[in-house]
Amino acid sequence: MSPLRDCMCRCEIGRYRSRHAAPNWWMNRILSFAVAAAAALAASLAQAQYPNKPIRVIVPWPAGGPSDTLARVVTSKTAELLGQTMIIDNRVGASGVIGTEFVAKSAPDAYTLFWPIANHTTNHLLFKVSYDPIKDFAPVGQVARSSYMLLVHPDLPAKSVKDLVDYVKARPGKLPYASAGNGTLQHLGMELFRREAGLDMIHIPYKGSAPAITDLLGGQVQITFESTTAVMGHVRSGKLRPLAVSTLKRIAPLPDLPTLAESGYAGFEVVGFAGVLAPAGTASEVVATLNAAFNKALLAPEVREKMAGMGVEPAGSSAEQFRAFLQAEIPKYARILKESGAKVD
């Protein structure tokens, strides 16, 4: 075959292949686009219909405790607004780590939510965990804020923060203070105050707030830094004496009680909180739906009344405000943990 004829044959074969292969190639492309579009449409429809089944809220603390009670109060109203059931699931253990890890590994469809409190910003500094407290979650919003109190047993001759500082400085290294355990906000809050006031004290960590408060009531220890929710009843009965609160503003139940910032420690703030997180990757539209429902629930008079009775105040926030709050809390407590050398027993 001549070179010219051979070339003409190859060209003819090429044209034949092009005519018959192109439709298949384009068909594959069209099929791929159709599948992707169908998936996007399905996801969009699912988001538009959210929620269309019960939502599980993981509370990593025991049923009947302050965190669980607050979660039930708020989610009950939120569920009503969403028109869907919200189920509280208490996944307890390892200072909240077990429940946190469960949510971090859950599908990002917002049918599994997390109810974090203050130790969400410190657990990863104390324990070996499989999640990042910021990157592995999509913030929905902050729900509540709560204060802590600097407290003494009534037998201690201290009626103010200044009295207590003078009393402790006159007895360096001799006076113990109780906390709910190493690395808890009760411990870190007291460490922050102790360092700012220049006090030399002995830390006695308990296994939770309940035993620490019991010994404080009994006079075995005489100083502590504890959540307002846990001690309000004892304060009202006169069994414990509060010297100051840890928030920048005074609290409504005790308007005459000064803040630590007002007591000579400008800028001092230790805040307890509760909020809602979804797994990372949750659609922004779904997060917005949840945020609006939770914020609206916090405006309900019956919810606000119950929260006030617990000694907490409604917070409400955007998703981004809650993220910024969490990001700011972590370095503050990381510094205190490093300086105090606190470790989990």
Image (tube, grey):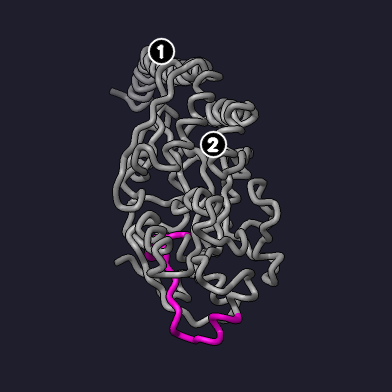
Amino acid type, mark 2: Val
Span of residues in magenta: 166-185
Secondary structure type for disc 1:
helix
Q: Is residue 152 magenta?
A: no
Q: Say which of 183 and 322 sits in front.
A: 183
Marks 1 and 2 sit apart, C-alpha to C-alpha, by 48 Å
Q: Position of residue 133 (x, y in %)?
A: 45, 50
Q: Is residue 84 visible?
A: yes
- Say which residue label 2 marks: 140
Residue lying at 40% horizontally and 14% vertically, measured from the top left: 27
Please state if 226 lies on the left or on the right of 180 as rendered: right
Residue lying at 34% horizontally and 18% vertically, measured from the top left: 13
Q: Position of residue 317 (x, y in %)?
A: 63, 39
Q: Position of residue 178 (x, y in %)?
A: 42, 67
Secondary structure type for disc 2:
strand
- Say which residue label 1 marks: 23
Residue 162: quadrant of the picture: bottom right
For the N terminus, the image quarter is top left
Marks 1 and 2: which is nearer the front?
A: 2
